[in-house]
Amino acid sequence: MPQPSQIRAFRLTRIAETGALFSRFDPYVASVNDAGLVAFQASLAAGGSGAFTGNGGPASGADAADAGLVGVYSHPDVNRGGDLCFYGTLKSGVQGAFLSRGNKLTAVASTDGRFQAIGPLGPTMNDWGAIAFRGILASGAHGVFATEGESVATIADTTGRFTAFHGLPVINAMGAIAFRADRKGGVQGIYASRGGSIETVAETGEQFSEIAPFPALNDEGAVAFAATLRSGGSGIFAATGGRIDTLVDDAGGLFESFRGALINRRGLVAFFATPMGGQLGVFSGADPAACRIIAVGDPLYGSAVAEFALNPVSANEAAQLAVRVSLVDGRQAVIRVDPVP
């Protein structure tokens, strides 16, 4: 898997900030499509919440009035065509996974039938409009699900070998889905659904003692993830074709822990980690000083970063990143990291 830094220099574009229109963006993350359009969830100063998109100018919201949507409780994912998917609640109290395309909002799964809950965290969507999401069935089984045309297929659930699911399932252009799960016996693992079967990508055992909850999957089928090694130490790893390679680790004594990674077809875009003696940050390479993008404590917009959040939906093929930040002075913002050639 290619490993050169895709972000050597960058500028920050402010997509949205709290104020007269928006009151909060947490606890969810922002996503970005290949054209640089950023999608985010926001609580409104006037009440309620919604899904919005922005590109550095005024934000636009998903038109949900006709469908009776009263709130959004996930990040929205956005594909190349500008379609949005997210979890929302209707006036009736029904929860659903929704697809917003053009001026039409469609519930692809909801709690008025097969499901008793949709979520948590948020769905992911590919450029063809296929959606992967987590939910709880009416039977009480937790699972990972995906849309297939107008129907919903069960990818994996807790009626079989899996006992719990973590993070969010990630779907790529080929319809493969990577997800983090626990299975019987206390084993943690990352698994991929390809062609109707479930493959093991990585599990705890001889090599790993712990696997982080947010794997990333690119359109080439590579899966990137953070993990702790059984022999000690931790790092960012990539699994391709049955082989696991180390992308970044703490062998040089520069990092003390790793949280997760973002990848595209070219390989590693960025990862979140804590450098030795430093603060949690986002980095584009193994040198925490030269490759730092943003970190807790960094000055930003006349204040300083108190918290940031991103996950596998937060990177695109242009190596742009969508980041939700909270500042020390109480303001929040959604920003886009734009690589500079």
Image (spheres, rainbow, N blue to C red):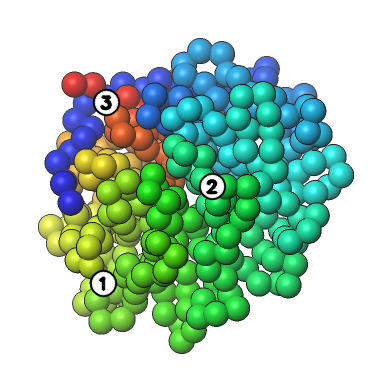
Name the residue rendered at 37%, 29% in the picture.
34
- Pair 2/3: label in front: 2
In percent of width and height, residue 22 lies at: 65, 25
Tell me if label 2 and label 3 are in contact, CB under 8 Å.
no
**How far is disc 3 from disc 1 in space, using C-alphas?**
32 Å
Q: Quadrant of residue 32?
A: top left
Name the residue rendered at 32%, 67% in the picture.
201
Q: Secondary structure at mark 2?
A: strand
Q: Which residue is mark 1?
A: 229
Which of disc 2 and disc 1 is earlier in sequence?
2
Q: Is residue 92 above or below residue 146?
A: above
Q: Which residue is mark 2?
A: 131
User: Quick check: 175 left or right of 141?
Assistant: left
In percent of width and height, residue 105 lies at: 69, 33
Asked whether the viewer can see residue 31, the reply is no
Q: Secondary structure at mark 3?
A: strand
Q: Which residue is mark 3?
A: 339
Q: Quadrant of residue 98?
A: top right
Q: Is residue 79 above or below residue 212?
A: above
Q: Secondary structure at mark 1?
A: strand
Mark 2: give few (<14), some (14-19) or many (20+) Cα within 10 Å: many
Mark 1: give few (<14), some (14-19) or many (20+) Cα within 10 Å: some
- Pair 1/2: label in front: 2
Q: Is residue 292 above or below residue 120?
A: above
The three-letter code of the residue at mark 1 reads Leu
**How far is disc 2 from disc 3 in space, using C-alphas?**
28 Å
The three-letter code of the residue at mark 3 reads Pro
User: How many circles with numbers are drawn on the protein?
Assistant: 3
Mark 3: give few (<14), some (14-19) or many (20+) Cα within 10 Å: some
The three-letter code of the residue at mark 2 reads Ile
